Image (cartoon, rainbow, N blue to C red):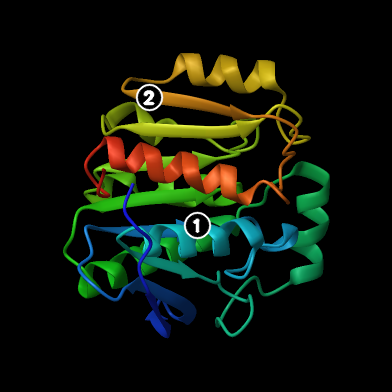
């Protein structure tokens, strides 16, 4: 693993599809080795770029040699846009667990990806956490990614069909007590998807990984190091 280096952070504005998004670009003070798009959880479930998992990933990856971009979905924080009728979509969300306007947030991930390309032409990794797993996976075909990391996805609520045509190394991280998806369902889904893939189950970290951020980020850094996207000893 690389020795940690100083991190430079910038607040950036991302030109989206009819709206401007707020983002954070973090990168090492010395030479970087890869670029990483980090997509956070659902806006109705703490989904902003200051989320504990998103923030920990940004700090860990940038300190180990990545240009890391995290962002706020439309309507979150200083990002423009969002659903026109928040109460209606929130009601649908709590009833069905999803709603059609979520596609706009997948478009936001596409816009963030396009901006990341303009700031870095280094090998690219897509990192999704919770709902962000779906938003990055929706953009796999456009990403030219060389690796993908999915943390606590919920394949019962969202389709991950795009994985079938993408053969880059995939890392799945989940906990043994995630209320959104049982271990048996997560394992069955993982077994059904394509190779190459790696699954890591973290104990007692729930869906939110509070207090387990270090273990989580260590797994991600080790995986990317093994695949040549971060430096190794």
Q: Is residue 178 visible?
A: yes
Q: Secondary structure at mark 2?
A: strand
Q: Is residue 40 visible?
A: no
Residue 96's x, y, as percent? 76, 42
170 or 154, which lies in front?
Answer: 170
As drawn, 1 above or below 106: above
Q: Position of residue 148 (x, y in %)?
A: 37, 41
- State which tag comes first along the sequence, 1 or 2: 1
Q: Which residue does the numbered mark 1 point to in the structure image?
A: 57
Disc number placed over residue 194 in the picture, else none: none
- Residue 70 image point, x, y percent: 47, 67
Number of the front mark, 1 or 2: 1
**Which residue is at a point 21% across and 42% down the rendered structure image?**
228
Q: Residue at x 65, y 61 (%)?
A: 52
In the picture of the structure, the residue carrying the numbered disc 2 is 197
User: Horizontal placement of 63 versus 130: left or right?
Assistant: left
Q: Nearer the viewer, residue 165 or 38?
A: 38
- On screen, residue 76 versus residue 38, left or right, reads right
Tell me which residue sits at (72%, 24%) in the image: 182
Instruction: Residue 110 in the image: state x and y as whole percent.
Output: 37, 61
Q: Quadrant of the C terminus?
A: top left
């Amino acid at each position: 693993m690389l020795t940690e280096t100083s991190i430079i952070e910038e607040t950036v504005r991302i030109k989206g599809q009819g709206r401007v998004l707020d983002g954070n670009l973090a990168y090492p003070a010395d030479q970087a080795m890869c670029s990483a798009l980090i997509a956070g959880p659902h806006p109705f479930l703490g989904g902003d770029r200051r989320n504990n998992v998103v923030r920990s990933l940004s700090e860990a990856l940038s300190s180990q040699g990545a240009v890391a971009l995290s962002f706020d979905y439309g309507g979150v924080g200083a990002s423009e846009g969002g659903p026109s009728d928040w109460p209606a979509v929130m009601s649908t969300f709590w009833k069905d667990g999803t709603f059609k306007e979520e596609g706009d947030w997948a478009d936001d991930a596409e816009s963030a990806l396009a901006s990341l390309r303009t700031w870095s032409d280094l090998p690219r990794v897509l990192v999704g956490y919770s709902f962000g797993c779906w938003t990055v996976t929706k953009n796999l075909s456009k990403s030219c990614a060389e690796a993908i990391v999915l943390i606590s996805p919920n394949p019962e609520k969202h389709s991950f069909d795009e994985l079938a045509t993408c053969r880059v190394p995939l890392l799945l991280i989940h906990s043994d007590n995630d209320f959104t998806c049982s271990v048996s369902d997560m394992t069955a889904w993982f077994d059904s998807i394509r190779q190459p893939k790696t699954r890591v189950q973290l104990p007692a970290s729930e869906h939110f990984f509070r207090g387990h951020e270090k273990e989580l980020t260590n797994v991600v850094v080790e995986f990317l190091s093994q695949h040549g996207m971060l430096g190794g000893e």
